[in-house]
Image: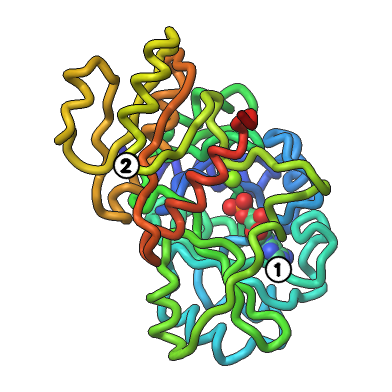
Amino acid sequence: MTASADEVKRAAALLRAGGVVAFPTETVYGLGAEATNLEAVRRVFAIKERPTDHPLIVHLATAQGLEDWARDIPATARLLAGTFWPGPLTLVLPRQPRVLDAVTGGQDSVALRVPAHPVARDLIAATGTLVAPSANRFGRVSPTTAQHVRDELESKVDMILDGGPCRVGVESTIVSLLHGKVVLLRPGGLSVEALESTLHQKIEMAPPTGYKVRVPGTLASHYAPATPLEIHPADALGRRALQRIRQGHKVAVLKLGADDEGFASSGIMTFPMPTGAGEYGRVLYATLHRLDHAGLHAVLVEAPPDTPEWLAVRDRLTRAACNLPKA
Ligand code: AMP
Ligand code: MG
């Protein structure tokens, strides 16, 4: 079910009047507001209950808008934008003075992306430039369907545009191009291999603590489902699940591929997950949303392979597992 042209028009009018509208992108659903409207941007933070030092990504209609928002743009940025926009890649660049402090968290840099979803593109073309963090409360699982947004934020937003399930399903890859370096700030929908083969250079990985730990010693519960999530190696998965079941716990197991070990026949609630990283990423959040409503004590997840194409999925699973009380 995709929003009609009339609905997109109505949403654009609401945004131009300072409203907040949830809309589909190819990564996850975004909570949109005009990037130049301070009041609207503040409402986005309030609706999400997001700390105000957590900067927002500015979404452009086309790469032509780059100069309006960023300065000192290096050739690498133009190459990446030309190759991967529209798409699941966010570039962090020195900002133009016009960018609101509220958007950048007061930093001298701005994060920019051109999304690929046709509804997002039509909406941005009709409005200008939108901030669009994921349309969920801070720290919860991102929405990949309009229903996920309705479940969590329906009463708080002016409108929700439906564009069907998100094609990518995990957030964009974020790359910093500041200080003449190329640094991966967050793995995401675009693979590091794709970036490296385009740039003909290795990309530095930012230490994960940079955006994981906001307060020393405190882990942000990013991407966390309400149900505790544990990651286990394949050979321990069934054993751990049976232990929990014997303790009287209700658990579900996300295993890679078909249930060859016969988990289900031993009474374990088993969800076979895709064995391809892209397909796994596409269904991950929807699976977590579904299981969050199942009254489980825990979700036990088989650790995906430790290879580059699984980087984004492993990152999100690791963050989701951060809410585990340490045993
Ligand atoms: P999201 O949580 O998907 O809305 O993406 C926001 C993320 O983009 C932030 O948590 C940062 O990691 C990154 N980001 C946004 N703006 C900036 C910026 N100006 N400098 C560095 N990173 C940024
Ligand atoms: Mg988010």
| Residue 255, image x, y percentages | 29, 37
Label 1 near ligand 1 (CB < 8 Å)? yes
| Residue 125, image x, y percentages | 51, 61
When the figure is inspected, residue 127 is found, relative to residue 266, above or below; the finding is below
Q: Quadrant of the C terminus?
A: top right
The structure's colour scheme is rainbow
89 to the left or right of 140: left
Q: Amino acid at mark 2?
A: Ala
- In the picture, the disc for residue 283 is none
Give the labeled residue for mark 2.
234
| Residue 124, image x, y percentages | 53, 58
When the figure is inspected, residue 143 is found, relative to residue 70, above or below; the finding is above
Q: Does residue 14 show up?
A: no
Residue drawn 57% across and 70% down?
Answer: 184
Q: Amino acid at mark 1?
A: Val
Give the labeled residue for mark 1.
110
Residue drawn 45% across and 39% down?
Answer: 231
| Residue 301, image x, y percentages | 39, 36
Separation of residues labelled 2 and 1 (CA atoms): 41 Å
For the residue pair 200 and 229, the one nearer the viewer reads as: 229
For the residue pair 247 and 320, the one nearer the viewer reads as: 247
Residue drawn 70% across and 68% down?
Answer: 110
Q: Does residue 64 show up?
A: yes
